[in-house]
Image (cartoon, helix red, strand yellow):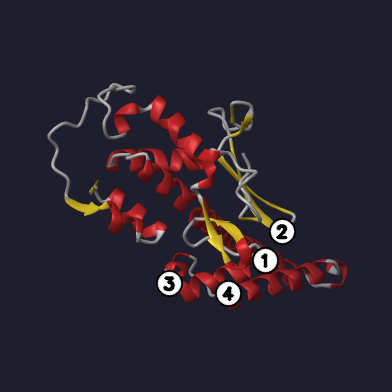
Amino acid sequence: MTLEFEIDSLDSLPEPLREHYAPHDGGKFRLAVENLPEPMGLKSALDKERDNNKAFKRFGKTPAAIQALLDREADVAAKSANLETLTRQAAASAEQETAKIHAELNIARANERAAIVGATIAAALGNAKATAEGHDLLSDRLSARVQLETKEGKRVATILGRDGKTPMLVSGKPASFADLVRDAKAQFPSLFEGTGAGGGGTPPRQGAAPKNVITRTEFDAMPAYERAAKLRSGVRLVD
């Protein structure tokens, strides 16, 4: 199921998905994901992230720098249209500049995807009580099954099946992040707490002492990216 960032009412949503939305100004509801960018574009998302925390260090660029890259790309494209009048040296320089700009933009877009999809999957794995090993092994695997697109100015995610090509359906409806994690739990039960099965031949991790312990209340109060880091470091959740 394609999840919209902001909706007017929970009535049209299946019951299992309502818990993922929180009330917002004006009587609307927004998807409860930490550090989710505003749907007005990458620049506004970067501004919000910079104000809220230091998560944008992973981008390595300020919003102004990203805009500068876009301006430079437009300038290079304009120059490329008149290559016949440019010298060979100028043309080669323009091509190198374009390649550099595209590479930097691709990095920024990849980090934007990690901030949105990675944080949501980390939260879903935490709710499903994935082990620290489960977080390590499943985070990237499940992220590859999420198709992130911009539709009508909104960032929407589509969950794909195990083939990574076709949309995943649950009871005839598009799957949610929770469905994605449930599918992983059925496929790899040994990577979640409370199971003794070893779908991949891995024995239950009985008697293994966690590095440290944190209450679920403290865990839920953390930003999504910090929760993922805690779980990957071996933190164990207790009620």
Which mark, by number, is residue 40? 1
Give x and y (percent) for residue 159: 57, 38
Indicate the secondary structure of the residue bearing disc 3.
loop
How far apart are the two marked residues, 1 and 3, measured between alpha carbons?
19 Å
Q: Residue sitting at 62 percent across and 45 percent down? A: 11
Give x and y (percent) for residue 181: 44, 36
Asked whether residue 144 appears in the rendered view, the answer is no
Pointers 2 and 1 in contact (C-beta within 8 Å) = yes
Residue pointed to by mark 2: 153
- Dot 3 or dot 2: first in sequence order is 3
Which mark, by number, is residue 53? 3
- Find residue 88 and report its image quarter: bottom right
| Callout 1 crowding tier (Cα within 10 Å): few <14, some 14–19, many ≥20 | few
Q: Amino acid at mark 4?
A: Pro
Residue pointed to by mark 4: 63
Closer-to-camera residue (170/66): 170
Q: Residue sitting at 78 percent across and 67 percent down? A: 77
How far apart are the two marked residues, 2 and 1, measured between alpha carbons?
7 Å
